[in-house]
Image (cartoon, coloured by chain):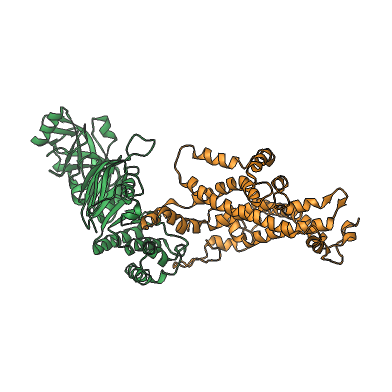
Chain colours: A orange, B green
Amino acid sequence: MSTSMTPRSSVPRQAGPDQAVRGNGHGILAAPPGMPQSPLEESSRRSRWVVGILLAVALLWTLVPLLWMLLSSFKNRTDVTSATPQVLFAPTLDNYRNLFTGSNNLGPYIWHSVLAAGISALLAVCLGALAGYGLARTQMRGKKHLAFWIISTRMAPIAAVVVPLFLIFRGLGLIDSIPGLVLAYLTFNLPFAIWLMSAFFAEVPASLEESALVAGCTRWQAFRTVILPLTKSGLVTTFVLCLVFAWNDYAFAVVFSGPNSQTLPIAASQLVTQTGIDWGQLTAIGTIVVVPMMLAGLAVRRWLVTGLTLGAVTGE
Amino acid sequence: MARVLYDEATRVYPGSTQPAVDALDLDIADGEFLVLVGPSGCGKSTSLRMLAGLERVDGGRIAIGERDVTHLPPRDRDIAMVFQNYALYPHMSVADNMGFALRVIKVPKDERNRRVLEAARLLDLEEFLDRKPKALSGGQRQRVAMGRAIVREPKVFLMDEPLSNLDAKLRVQTRTQVAALQRRLGTTTVYVTHDQVEAMTMGDRVAVLKDGLLQQVDTPLRLYQQPANVFVAGFIGSPSMNLAEYRVEGEEAVLSGGTRTRLTRETLKALRDEGTDRVILGFRPEAVEVVGDADKDHTTFPVTVTVVEELGSDAFLYGQYADATDPALREETVIARVDPTAPPSKGARVFLRIVPGKEQLFSAGTGLRLPT
C-alpha cells in the first residue's frame, strides 16, 4: 500500500523498450530522433498545451481568492478597504488579536467546530465502515438499490430536512448542543461514509477474509486484523472528507446551534452586521477556517490520492 | 491428520433449483491426496468450500476425523486452505503471513518463529521472510501460501487450484513439489483443479464431478482404463478418447463402411436388456494401430489425415472416417497415436485397426459403461 515501498523482486527488472522510449520526455508516441514528426505527435503536443493552460486557469481560480484572503487578514483597516488593491503593505496581527480578545472571543467557536466536526466525522467513519463492510459483503437481491437509496439520502438539499430535524431536535432537547450538531452532521456524513467505505471494501478480495476465517479468526477478528488495515486509505479519505463537510457546514449550525454550540462559520457570519462588515476580521476567520482543512488534506495527501482513485488494496 | 467424509453433502445456492453439489459421497482416507476435478461449474470448488466451512451445507453432513463439522464455523475445523489467488495479506511480511494462524490461536512467539522458520526452510523461503508479498514473484507467493498452510499443522489441507496462476513450466515443477511435500507430511489433502493432467499426476485418487454430481472416484489409472461413463472417458486422458455412437448389427458394431467390431456376449445381453441397437464405442488414441494396405480386412477402417501433431516422443494423427455412411460419423474426428519416427503426412489415407480388447463400450441411452 505504501507508495514509498520499492518492489524488490528477485527477478531483476529490465528496462523494457517502452520505458526507454518514455524516458525521452515526449511520451510513448514520440518519434525517434531525426524522423519527421507525425500528425499524431503534433496533436498530442497541442493537447498537452491546452491541458496545461486549462490547469493553470483552474489553479489561479482556486488559489487567488484564498491567497487574497490570507493577505487581507494581515492588513490594517485602511489597507483592507483601500480602493486600489494593496499587495505590499505593513503586516499586522491586529485582526487575529481582536478575534481572541473582547466580549466575543473566537476560542469557544473553534472548540465547538472541532468537537462537532471531529466527533461526527469519527462516528461517520466507524459506523460507515461497519455498514459499508456489511453492504459490500452481503449477497442479496436489490443490493444495488439499497446502496443507491443510502447515497440518495445524501442528495436531498439540507433546506428540505432542516425544519423536520429542528422539530425533532427540539423535542429531544438537542437544540444548542454539540451532540445535536454531531447528529445533524451525521445525516449527511453517514450515507456518504457508508457508500464510500463499501466501495473500498468491495475492492478487497473476499478470499483474504476467508483465508483469515480458515486460519482461526472470527468474523470480527478477520475484519479488524486483515480487512481494516487494508482499507486504511479508505478510512483516512472518508474521515477527511466527512471532517471537511462538517467543518464547513453553515446551514445546520445556523438553525440548531446557540451560544453553547456555535461554530466558526457562524462566527464569521456574525461579523457581517447591519453597521458594516469588518473585512479584516472576516478574512482572518476565513483563514482560520480554511487552513486546518488544507493542512489535514496535505497531511493525508498520500492516502487521499490512492483513496480517491481506489484500487490500492489488491496487494499486487 | 484425519479421515474426511462427505455423506450426501448437498449445496443449493439461493435462487437456484439445481443443486451446485448434489448428494456428494466421498470417503477420503487419512493421509490421502484426493483430487476433485471437472469442468468449470461442476461443483468442485463448492465441495471444497463446504469442507472449509465457507459454504453452507444444505443437506447431508461432512465429518473431519470423528467430528461432524457440518455446521461448524471454519475456524473450528482445524484445516488450512491454499487459495487460487493465494490470498496473502498484503500488509504483512512473509513471516507474519505464515505465522498468522498461529498468532490467532495464541501460540507463544518462540514456538511460532520456530515453526515459521522450519516451513520457510522446507520451501526455500528463508531469505524472503521479511519481505511483503508484493515484492515476491508468482512462484514465491505460491510457496508462501503453501507455507502458511504447513505452519498450521492442520488435520486437512484444502487446495483450490493453487497452481493455476503459475506459468506452464513452473506449474509442472511445482506440481511434483506439492505432491512430494504432501507425501512427506502425510497430511490428508483435498485438491481442486480443472486440469485433468494435474489431477492424474498428483492424486492418490481422483474424483470426477460434473453438474454437481460425482461421476467416479478412483485411482488415476483405473479412471483411465475403466471409466464409469462416457463423460469420464472423454474427460480423462489427453488427447481424449475417440467416442462415437454406432449401429449394432447381429453380434457386431458397424464402425464405418464394411468395418465391424465383434461385441461380447455380456455386452450384447446388456444392449438387449436395454432394448437398443445403438452403442457408444470408445478407443484411446494409443489403442489403434496403423496397418498397411496389404493387411486391411473387416476390422480396419480408412481415415483421411487432416492434422498431424508431432511432439517428438509422440505423434498424433487427427483424421476423418473416409468411408463413413452415417452422416453423423462423417463429422467425427479420429485421433490416433502413430509412430513419431514415421508419421503419415497430411491428406494421406491410412488404415487403422482398434487393438482387440482395447475398445470401451458405453450405453447410448445412459452413457454408463457396458460389461465386456
For residue A6, above or below residue A265: below
Residue B367 spot, x, y in % from top left: 22, 36
For residue A226, above or below residue B42: below
For residue A264, above or below residue B113: above
In this orientation, which residue lies closer to the viewer: A84 or B140?
A: A84
Residue found 40% across the figure and 62% down from its top: B141
In this orientation, which residue lies closer to the viewer: A208 or B222?
A: A208
Residue A123 as seen in the image, left or right of residue B81? right
Residue A258 spot, x, y in % from top left: 72, 49
Q: Quadrant of residue A307?
A: bottom right
Please indicate, yes or no, whether residue B263 appears anywhere in the rendered image: yes
Residue A270 spot, x, y in % from top left: 79, 51
Residue B116 as seen in the image, left or right of residue B213? right
Residue found 39% across the figure and 35% down from its top: B15
Residue found 48% across the figure and 47% down from its top: A134
Q: Quadrant of residue B168?
A: bottom left
Please indicate, yes or no, whether residue B348 appears anywhere in the rendered image: no
Q: Residue furthest top?
A: B275
Residue A89 as seen in the image, left or right of residue B300? right
Residue B153 spot, x, y in % from top left: 30, 62
In this orientation, which residue lies closer to the viewer: B129 or A16?
A: B129
- Report how many numbered discs are placed on residues in the image: 0
Residue A254 as seen in the image, left or right of residue B297? right
